[in-house]
Amino acid sequence: MSHHTFPKLHNALWPGVVGKGPDSEPPIDLDTMLELTAAAEVDGVKFDGVDLFLFAPHVEIDATDDQLQQLADQVRAKHLVIGSVVAPVWPPTDGGSAMGSDAQRQQFLTQVRKACRIARQLREMGVRPYGVVRVDSAVDPETWSQDPETNTRRIAETFRQACDIAEDHGERLAAEGEICWGGMHSWKKMVQLLELVDRRETLGFQADMAHTLLYLLGYNAPEDRILPEDWDWQDPQVLDDALASLTAALRPWTIDFHVAQNDATVNGSGSHDKTGRHCLPNDPHGKLDIARHAGHWLRDENGRLTKQFRHICWDGCMFQTRRCSNRKRGTISYGP
């Protein structure tokens, strides 16, 4: 257990699936990911739970009641709980673009509905005491840029319909801002979309430290860059000031939080588009002082804890299998 009642500390299990596949590495099965999570420990601190990607081979989006009960039993057997879950809204996972045709948008909403059904059922089983259902626009920035105003309106309309579904299931949605998702690929575009949807009680922002660092750099939206172009990373105050500006805009919307390291570069693996590269916490090229910079998201402008979420999640998205499964280094790769 962690030393504080809240936030609980979770491990993301999607590094076993995301970026894996026929044109990359084989997936890491759910049992192995649970075992690695349960075994990780640093100075007596262990993970309290896991966050899940609702897609095979980990969790079938059309899982039966019996299969979900088996999942709950698997997690409990490791003395863990389940928190946030990722809805498989993308075309390769049977979803569709949130700004696409009517049929594509219905595919998106169908996957949200199925994810919310699983989230609610796990909650009712008592294995999921908190957490959100994670979504994004499921379209790339280049396609979005062909008609930004119209496409943002369409994404917002789809998200509002997704909010209706979530409310019917007693769930909340979190849109994860990444440079690879059209209409969500910069901090300004993300705020504009959230304001346009205008369902603050149901739709919030999921902040991932690796992705939001690239927001500062304006990677796919140079017009929204916050850090100076010629900055050489030598003055930490410049980074702190930039993060203060970024979080002032997005923190009021933030309802889910991923702890991560980034080296100011991008990475893509398998079918996943290039996005913020996730690194080990102690990566020599990492740009973040994780504990200190996380404070920009966890505390308000006066230094007071916001207490907006009951758990935080370590995210090693697209880590290579050898890094995930090396027992000798397990407390570095998967440790708090």
Image (cartoon, grey):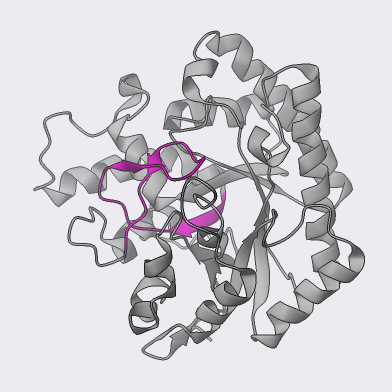
The span shown in magenta is: 255-280
**Toward the viewer: 100 or 231?**
100
Residue visible at 51% across and 79% down in the picture: 36
Please provide percent x and percent y for residue 323: 37, 68
Please provide percent x and percent y for residue 132: 68, 55
Can I make out residue 3 in this image?
no
Principal secondary structure, stretch drawn in magenta: loop
Question: Residue 334 falls in which quadrant of the image?
Answer: bottom left
Question: Residue 136 falls in which quadrant of the image?
Answer: top right
Please provide percent x and percent y for residue 122: 80, 67
Q: Is residue 105 magenta?
A: no
Please provide percent x and percent y for residue 300: 43, 53
Question: Residue 200 falls in which quadrant of the image?
Answer: top right
Residue visible at 55% across and 66% down in the picture: 28
Q: Is residue 251 left or right of residue 301?
A: right
Can I make out residue 153 in this image?
yes
**Toward the viewer: 22 or 202?**
22
Residue visible at 31% across and 36% down in the picture: 216
Split into 4 quadrants, where in the image is the C terminus?
A: bottom left
Q: Is residue 200 above or below residue 131?
A: above
Q: Is residue 269 magenta?
A: yes
